[in-house]
Image (cartoon, rainbow, N blue to C red):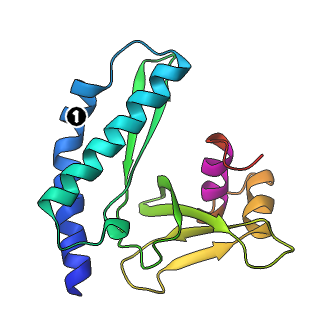
Amino acid sequence: MDENVKLFCDARDYVLSTLAQKIEVFLPGVWDPINKFMVIREVIDIVERELINLFPMISIKQLPRCRFRVFEENMEIEAGVQNYYNHEPELSFLGTTMLGSEMFDCYYRGSYDPRFEYMFIARYGHKEDDFYIGSKTAAAEYYLGQQTPLSLAYGLALEDGFIG
């Protein structure tokens, strides 16, 4: 296993083992839109600063990312932690999702092709070529109701307001 991947996995395992406690301490039960945004942003910053201190040998752009979703009606918090080493640090992390028994990390980025506004990436392993990528395909699969890694990435971007 590549040294970068091993370090990433150590950092990811640390985040997974401590995240529940951080959520319990830092995320209160009162949710107004400004409070929600600020507290989630601060929890993400706390996790990142802690990882920088504990794992200085990992580039800041390669640290495991967290993503939170708050469901006010149930007072539930869903936390997703990046599972796989991302070889492209310019990608924006949308979250993790399960499809069957397989876990996917979902990302998006602007497209270099002027015909497509965004590209969606679903990573399923640590290797550099362990991913699916698409743009119009992701949107089409999402609107057709198909459960594919790309349609799930598109759905996460849509839910979070990254695309409209």
Query: Residue visible at 25% across and 80% down?
Result: 4
The question of residue 131 being in magenta is answered with no
Looking at the image, residue 59 sits to the left or right of residue 56; the answer is right
Location of residue 85 by image quarter: bottom left
The question of residue 153 being in magenta is answered with yes
Which SS does the magenta portion mostly show?
helix
Image position, residue 158 (x, y; %): 69, 46
Looking at the image, residue 86 sits to the left or right of residue 50; the answer is right
| 107 or 53, nearer to the observer | 53
In which quadrant will I find the N terminus?
bottom left
Looking at the image, residue 25 sits to the left or right of residue 134; the answer is left
Name the outermost residue toward the top.
30
Q: Is 12 rendered above or below residue 71?
A: below
Location of residue 109 by image quarter: bottom right
Name the outermost residue toward the left.
54
Instruction: Look at mark 1 in the image and give the residue it sits on.
Output: 22
Query: Residue visible at 39% across and 28% down?
Result: 39
* Stretch of the chain drawn in magenta: 151-158
Q: Is 128 rendered above or below residue 149?
A: below
Query: Residue visible at 49% across and 30% down?
Result: 37
Q: Amino acid at mark 1?
A: Lys
Q: Is 144 rendered above or below residue 117?
A: above
Location of residue 52 by image quarter: bottom left
Q: Secondary structure at mark 1?
A: helix
Looking at the image, residue 112 sits to the left or right of residue 61; the answer is right
